[in-house]
């Protein structure tokens, strides 16, 4: 089967929905903030007045980028003073809601531009499986939860839409694609980093046995898709085309490119760990004991992060209203099922810090 040449990934739901309902990615990324701050201390900076370049690979609508960029800039300011220019590149797919991103950068009280006259943000709409910035241009790079998405789908899944819920040869084929994509991502970032630059990545992780805490929610969503097919909301062919390109990795998968030589395209590993992520929605449920509220938050998170990709499988003749109706029906059905299954999500995040070998 011929591979698709374009990323089969729907951008996160726009109009600020991702910013409001992406608490799980925000919590996971927060665990890597100390690593980003330490990376900002470690990068080599000359004494010139050239701009320091920070890249945010996979920014979505900007809310979850504020704390990382603010933390990195604070460390850099302590090193170089208040006047040296800092350029921040936010990158995401071309269809990303960049209007919301820029609105957040300008108006959010937690933004990194407040009281900063020498920080200059910009955005680039391009997949990070292609070159994004010039060679040896980036001092410090950050990517949170974006590298979990594959560049292409090698085949459609059968009976499910989520890769970790599959087994055998099918799962192996997707994990092979994930390994190729991870190497591509790393090699491109290695080219873009300056010597002694740093790349900090956080992304959803699997346990060593390949399991994920999201499996139960995904199984419920899969059941709702079957209901919608039977009800005629989507066709059987549209359902068959629904495969999420989200492929979490084990810690060993992150380290695999470095196993043979201790480095990969000049990158060396300074840190790698897998950590549990706080489930704030569950903590709130423990206080209010409201299963409907918990189910609503879980379903809205699913819609915000995953449904745009599933919507891409709908036929080209589907109009905006039909697509919105599908999204709403899937969210409502998932919420209905989850009310009876309040659960804690013991989500794992993998973190890795990479340094570019060489001297300025």
Image (cartoon, rainbow, N blue to C red):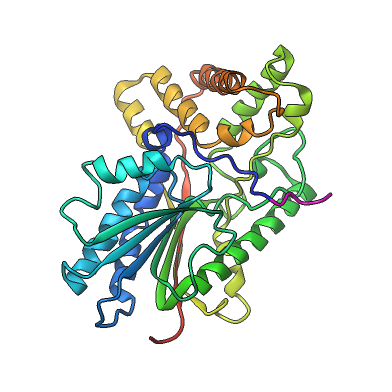
* Residue 157 vertical position relative to residue 51 in the rendered view, above or below: above
Foreground residue, 284 or 152?
152
Q: Quadrant of residue 280?
A: top left
Q: Position of residue 336 (x, y in %)?
A: 53, 16
Q: Main secondary structure of the magenta part?
A: loop
Q: Quadrant of the C terminus?
A: bottom left
Q: Position of residue 251 (x, y in %)?
A: 54, 61
Q: Residue furthest bottom?
A: 359
Residue drawn 56% across the image and 31% down it: 217
Residue drawn 48% across the image and 19% down it: 339
Q: Quadrant of residue 180?
A: bottom right
Range of residues picked out in magenta: 1-5
* Residue 89 vertical position relative to residue 114 in the rendered view, above or below: below
How many numbered tags mark residues here? 0
Residue 2 lies within the magenta run: yes
Residue drawn 53% across the image and 52% down it: 205
Q: Position of residue 108 (x, y in %)?
A: 25, 41
Q: Is residue 272 visible?
A: yes
């Amino acid at each position: 089967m011929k591979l698709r040449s374009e990323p089969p990934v729907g951008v996160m739901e726009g109009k600020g929905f991702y910013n409001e309902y992406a608490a799980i990615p925000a919590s996971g990324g927060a665990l890597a903030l100390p690593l980003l701050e330490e990376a900002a201390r470690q990068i080599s900076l000359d004494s010139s007045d050239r701009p320091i370049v920070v890249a945010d690979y996979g920014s979505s609508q900007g809310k979850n980028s504020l704390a990382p960029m603010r933390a990195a800039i604070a460390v850099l300011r302590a090193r170089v003073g208040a006047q040296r220019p800092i350029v921040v590149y936010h990158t995401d797919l071309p269809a990303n809601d960049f209007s919301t991103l820029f609105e957040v950068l300008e108006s959010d009280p937690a933004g990194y531009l407040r009281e900063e006259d020498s920080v200059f943000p910009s955005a680039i709409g391009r997949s990070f499986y292609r070159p994004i910035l010039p060679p040896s241009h980036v001092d410090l790079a950050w990517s949170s939860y974006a590298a979990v998405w594959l560049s292409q789908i090698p085949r459609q899944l059968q009976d499910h839409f989520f890769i970790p819920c599959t087994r055998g040869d099918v799962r192996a084929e997707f994990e092979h694609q994930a390994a190729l994509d991870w190497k591509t991502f790393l090699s491109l970032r290695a080219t873009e980093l300056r010597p002694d630059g740093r790349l900090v990545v956080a992304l959803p992780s699997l346990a060593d046995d390949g399991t994920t805490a999201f499996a139960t929610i995904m199984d419920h969503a899969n059941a709702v898709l079957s209901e919608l097919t039977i009800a005629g909301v989507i066709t059987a062919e549209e359902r068959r085309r629904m495969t999420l390109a989200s492929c979490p990795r084990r810690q060993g998968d992150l380290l695999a490119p470095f196993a043979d030589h201790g480095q990969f395209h000049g990158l060396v590993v300074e840190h790698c760990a897998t950590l549990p992520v706080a489930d704030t929605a569950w903590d709130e449920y423990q206080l209010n004991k409201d299963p409907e509220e918990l189910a609503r938050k879980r379903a809205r998170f699913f819609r915000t992060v995953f449904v745009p990709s599933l919507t891409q499988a709908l036929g080209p003749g589907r109009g905006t209203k039909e697509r919105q109706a599908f999204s709403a029906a899937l969210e409502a059905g998932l919420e209905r099922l989850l009310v009876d299954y309040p659960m804690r999500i013991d989500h794992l995040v993998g973190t890795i810090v990479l340094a570019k070998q060489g001297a300025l």
